[in-house]
Amino acid sequence: AQSVTQPDIHITVSEGASLELRCNYSYGATPYLFWYVQSPGQGLQLLLKYFSGDTLVQGIKGFEAEFKRSQSSFNLRKPSVHWSDAAEYFCAVGLGGSNYKLTFGKGTLLTVNP
Amino acid sequence: DAGVIQSPRHEVTEMGQEVTLRCKPISGHNSLFWYRQTMMRGLELLIYFNNNVPIDDSGMPEDRFSAKMPNASFSTLKIQPSEPRDSAVYFCASRANISGKVAEKLFFGSGTQLSVL
Protein backbone atom coordinates (compact mmCIF):
# COMPACT_ATOMS: atom_id res chain seq x y z
CA ALA A 1 0.00 0.00 0.00
CA GLN A 2 1.15 3.49 -0.72
CA SER A 3 2.24 5.61 2.22
CA VAL A 4 3.50 9.09 2.88
CA THR A 5 5.90 10.14 5.62
CA GLN A 6 6.48 13.68 6.77
CA PRO A 7 9.30 13.30 9.31
CA ASP A 8 8.94 16.76 10.85
CA ILE A 9 5.86 17.33 12.96
CA HIS A 10 6.69 20.96 13.72
CA ILE A 11 9.20 23.39 12.22
CA THR A 12 9.97 26.93 13.32
CA VAL A 13 11.76 29.40 11.08
CA SER A 14 12.40 33.11 11.16
CA GLU A 15 10.73 35.37 8.68
CA GLY A 16 12.95 35.77 5.64
CA ALA A 17 14.73 32.48 6.20
CA SER A 18 14.61 29.63 3.73
CA LEU A 19 12.34 26.65 4.26
CA GLU A 20 12.41 23.00 3.34
CA LEU A 21 9.69 20.57 4.36
CA ARG A 22 10.41 16.91 3.86
CA CYS A 23 8.18 14.27 2.31
CA ASN A 24 8.97 10.65 1.53
CA TYR A 25 6.66 8.21 -0.13
CA SER A 26 6.54 4.48 -0.43
CA TYR A 27 5.18 2.97 -3.60
CA GLY A 28 6.45 0.68 -6.33
CA ALA A 29 5.87 3.09 -9.17
CA THR A 30 6.06 6.86 -9.39
CA PRO A 31 2.83 8.20 -7.96
CA TYR A 32 1.29 11.58 -8.49
CA LEU A 33 2.61 13.90 -5.78
CA PHE A 34 0.95 16.88 -4.16
CA TRP A 35 1.53 19.49 -1.51
CA TYR A 36 -1.46 21.06 0.24
CA VAL A 37 -1.54 23.85 2.82
CA GLN A 38 -4.07 24.27 5.61
CA SER A 39 -4.49 27.59 7.39
CA PRO A 40 -6.13 27.57 10.84
CA GLY A 41 -9.85 26.85 10.62
CA GLN A 42 -9.69 26.30 6.88
CA GLY A 43 -9.74 23.42 4.46
CA LEU A 44 -6.73 22.32 2.46
CA GLN A 45 -5.55 24.28 -0.55
CA LEU A 46 -3.40 22.84 -3.31
CA LEU A 47 0.08 24.39 -3.51
CA LEU A 48 1.55 22.34 -6.33
CA LYS A 49 1.55 18.92 -7.94
CA TYR A 50 3.89 16.65 -9.87
CA PHE A 51 2.80 14.17 -12.51
CA SER A 52 5.74 13.77 -14.87
CA GLY A 53 8.39 15.72 -16.74
CA ASP A 54 10.50 18.38 -15.09
CA THR A 55 11.27 17.21 -11.56
CA LEU A 56 11.24 20.77 -10.18
CA VAL A 57 7.71 22.10 -10.02
CA GLN A 58 6.58 25.60 -9.20
CA GLY A 59 3.50 26.32 -7.17
CA ILE A 60 1.52 29.19 -5.77
CA LYS A 61 2.79 31.61 -3.13
CA GLY A 62 6.42 31.20 -4.21
CA PHE A 63 6.69 27.53 -3.27
CA GLU A 64 8.48 24.88 -5.27
CA ALA A 65 9.09 21.17 -4.83
CA GLU A 66 11.58 18.76 -6.26
CA PHE A 67 10.85 15.14 -7.05
CA LYS A 68 13.82 12.84 -6.46
CA ARG A 69 13.07 9.30 -7.60
CA SER A 70 16.25 7.84 -6.09
CA GLN A 71 15.27 9.12 -2.66
CA SER A 72 11.51 8.65 -3.02
CA SER A 73 11.18 12.23 -1.89
CA PHE A 74 9.17 15.29 -2.82
CA ASN A 75 10.44 18.09 -0.58
CA LEU A 76 8.77 21.48 -0.50
CA ARG A 77 10.92 24.61 -0.51
CA LYS A 78 10.62 28.35 -0.30
CA PRO A 79 13.63 30.71 -0.46
CA SER A 80 12.24 33.35 1.89
CA VAL A 81 9.41 32.66 4.30
CA HIS A 82 6.74 35.25 5.07
CA TRP A 83 4.75 35.41 8.31
CA SER A 84 1.63 34.54 6.33
CA ASP A 85 3.15 31.17 5.44
CA ALA A 86 2.51 29.93 8.97
CA ALA A 87 0.17 26.97 8.48
CA GLU A 88 0.13 23.20 8.33
CA TYR A 89 1.52 21.56 5.22
CA PHE A 90 0.46 18.18 3.89
CA CYS A 91 2.18 16.00 1.35
CA ALA A 92 -0.07 13.58 -0.55
CA VAL A 93 0.38 10.80 -3.07
CA GLY A 94 -2.04 9.27 -5.51
CA LEU A 95 -1.92 6.49 -8.02
CA GLY A 96 -2.28 7.18 -11.69
CA GLY A 97 -4.89 5.89 -14.05
CA SER A 98 -8.44 5.82 -12.84
CA ASN A 99 -7.61 5.53 -9.16
CA TYR A 100 -9.26 8.26 -7.18
CA LYS A 101 -7.54 8.00 -3.81
CA LEU A 102 -5.10 10.45 -2.30
CA THR A 103 -3.10 9.36 0.72
CA PHE A 104 -2.04 12.22 2.95
CA GLY A 105 0.92 12.52 5.28
CA LYS A 106 0.25 13.60 8.85
CA GLY A 107 1.38 17.12 8.17
CA THR A 108 4.11 19.53 9.25
CA LEU A 109 3.14 22.56 11.28
CA LEU A 110 5.14 25.64 10.31
CA THR A 111 5.65 28.46 12.78
CA VAL A 112 7.21 31.69 11.54
CA ASN A 113 8.98 33.94 14.03
CA PRO A 114 9.17 37.69 13.37
CA ASP B 1 -17.62 30.37 -7.26
CA ALA B 2 -18.57 29.86 -3.64
CA GLY B 3 -16.33 26.86 -3.13
CA VAL B 4 -17.27 23.75 -1.17
CA ILE B 5 -19.71 24.72 1.57
CA GLN B 6 -20.00 22.74 4.78
CA SER B 7 -22.38 23.17 7.67
CA PRO B 8 -22.31 23.52 10.54
CA ARG B 9 -18.82 24.90 11.18
CA HIS B 10 -18.95 23.67 14.75
CA GLU B 11 -21.08 21.02 16.39
CA VAL B 12 -21.09 20.11 20.04
CA THR B 13 -23.26 17.21 21.06
CA GLU B 14 -23.64 14.63 23.76
CA MET B 15 -22.72 11.00 23.44
CA GLY B 16 -25.54 8.96 21.94
CA GLN B 17 -27.03 11.81 19.93
CA GLU B 18 -27.40 11.77 16.18
CA VAL B 19 -25.14 14.13 14.24
CA THR B 20 -25.65 15.20 10.63
CA LEU B 21 -22.96 17.02 8.70
CA ARG B 22 -23.79 18.67 5.40
CA CYS B 23 -21.86 19.48 2.26
CA LYS B 24 -22.56 21.37 -0.94
CA PRO B 25 -19.88 20.64 -3.56
CA ILE B 26 -18.75 23.06 -6.21
CA SER B 27 -21.25 23.24 -9.04
CA GLY B 28 -20.21 20.97 -11.89
CA HIS B 29 -17.99 18.76 -9.76
CA ASN B 30 -19.14 15.18 -9.91
CA SER B 31 -16.81 13.57 -7.37
CA LEU B 32 -17.27 14.13 -3.66
CA PHE B 33 -15.15 12.97 -0.75
CA TRP B 34 -15.63 12.92 3.02
CA TYR B 35 -12.44 13.06 5.11
CA ARG B 36 -11.89 12.97 8.86
CA GLN B 37 -8.93 14.73 10.45
CA THR B 38 -7.55 13.91 13.90
CA MET B 39 -4.21 14.52 15.55
CA MET B 40 -3.55 10.82 15.92
CA ARG B 41 -4.54 9.57 12.49
CA GLY B 42 -4.21 12.63 10.27
CA LEU B 43 -6.51 12.88 7.26
CA GLU B 44 -8.50 9.74 6.55
CA LEU B 45 -10.76 9.20 3.57
CA LEU B 46 -14.14 7.98 4.79
CA ILE B 47 -16.16 7.66 1.59
CA TYR B 48 -16.10 8.71 -2.03
CA PHE B 49 -19.00 9.43 -4.39
CA ASN B 50 -18.89 9.66 -8.15
CA ASN B 51 -21.97 11.00 -9.92
CA ASN B 52 -23.89 10.70 -6.64
CA VAL B 53 -23.10 7.00 -6.32
CA PRO B 54 -20.99 5.73 -3.40
CA ILE B 55 -17.91 4.12 -4.93
CA ASP B 56 -15.88 3.18 -1.90
CA ASP B 57 -16.94 3.37 1.72
CA SER B 58 -14.16 1.19 3.09
CA GLY B 59 -12.92 4.08 5.19
CA MET B 60 -16.17 4.44 7.12
CA PRO B 61 -15.24 3.43 10.68
CA GLU B 62 -18.33 1.39 11.52
CA ASP B 63 -22.04 1.06 11.01
CA ARG B 64 -22.73 4.12 13.09
CA PHE B 65 -21.50 6.18 10.14
CA SER B 66 -23.52 6.62 6.98
CA ALA B 67 -23.32 8.99 4.03
CA LYS B 68 -25.74 9.93 1.30
CA MET B 69 -25.70 12.01 -1.82
CA PRO B 70 -29.30 12.43 -2.98
CA ASN B 71 -28.32 14.81 -5.77
CA ALA B 72 -25.30 16.44 -7.36
CA SER B 73 -25.41 19.46 -5.08
CA PHE B 74 -25.80 17.95 -1.63
CA SER B 75 -24.32 15.27 0.59
CA THR B 76 -24.70 14.32 4.23
CA LEU B 77 -22.57 12.39 6.68
CA LYS B 78 -24.50 11.02 9.61
CA ILE B 79 -23.26 9.53 12.87
CA GLN B 80 -25.83 7.67 14.96
CA PRO B 81 -25.22 7.23 17.82
CA SER B 82 -22.25 9.52 18.28
CA GLU B 83 -19.37 8.70 20.63
CA PRO B 84 -16.59 10.85 22.11
CA ARG B 85 -14.01 9.14 19.88
CA ASP B 86 -15.84 10.58 16.87
CA SER B 87 -14.63 14.04 17.84
CA ALA B 88 -12.64 15.35 14.89
CA VAL B 89 -12.76 17.79 12.01
CA TYR B 90 -14.75 16.43 9.11
CA PHE B 91 -13.94 17.76 5.66
CA CYS B 92 -15.86 17.51 2.46
CA ALA B 93 -14.00 17.88 -0.82
CA SER B 94 -15.09 17.87 -4.43
CA ARG B 95 -13.37 17.39 -7.73
CA ALA B 96 -14.19 17.60 -11.39
CA ASN B 97 -14.02 14.07 -12.69
CA ILE B 98 -13.40 14.85 -16.31
CA SER B 99 -10.99 12.01 -16.87
CA GLY B 100 -11.65 9.92 -13.78
CA LYS B 101 -8.09 10.39 -12.67
CA VAL B 102 -6.65 11.31 -9.32
CA ALA B 103 -4.65 14.02 -11.05
CA GLU B 104 -7.53 16.44 -10.88
CA LYS B 105 -7.43 19.04 -8.14
CA LEU B 106 -9.36 18.52 -4.91
CA PHE B 107 -11.23 21.48 -3.46
CA PHE B 108 -11.85 21.32 0.28
CA GLY B 109 -14.51 22.89 2.40
CA SER B 110 -13.65 24.62 5.66
CA GLY B 111 -14.65 21.59 7.69
CA THR B 112 -16.98 20.84 10.57
CA GLN B 113 -15.39 20.70 14.01
CA LEU B 114 -17.30 17.99 15.88
CA SER B 115 -17.05 17.59 19.62
CA VAL B 116 -18.90 14.70 21.25
CA LEU B 117 -19.04 15.04 25.02
Image (cartoon, coloured by chain):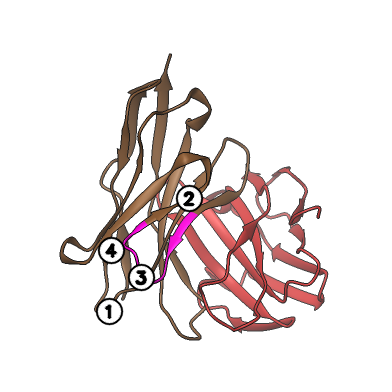
Chain colours: A brown, B red
Numbered mark located on residue A25 in the image: 4
Residue positioned most to the top: A114
Q: Is residue A112 left or right of residue A20?
A: right
Quarter occupied by residue A81: top left
What chain does badge 2 belong to?
Answer: A
Amino acid, disc 1: Ala
Tag 1 near tag 2, CB within 8 Å: no
Q: Earlier in the sequence, mark 1 or mark 3?
A: 1
Q: Any magenta on residue B85?
A: no
Amino acid, disc 4: Tyr
User: What residue did someone put label 1 on?
Assistant: A29
Tag 1 near tag 3, CB within 8 Å: no
Callout 4 crowding tier (Cα within 10 Å): few <14, some 14–19, many ≥20: many
Q: Could you say which is closer to the camera, residue A110 or residue B22?
A: A110
Q: Earlier in the sequence, mark 4 or mark 2?
A: 4
User: What residue did someone put label 2 on?
Assistant: A59
Name which residue lies at 43% across and 50% down: A90
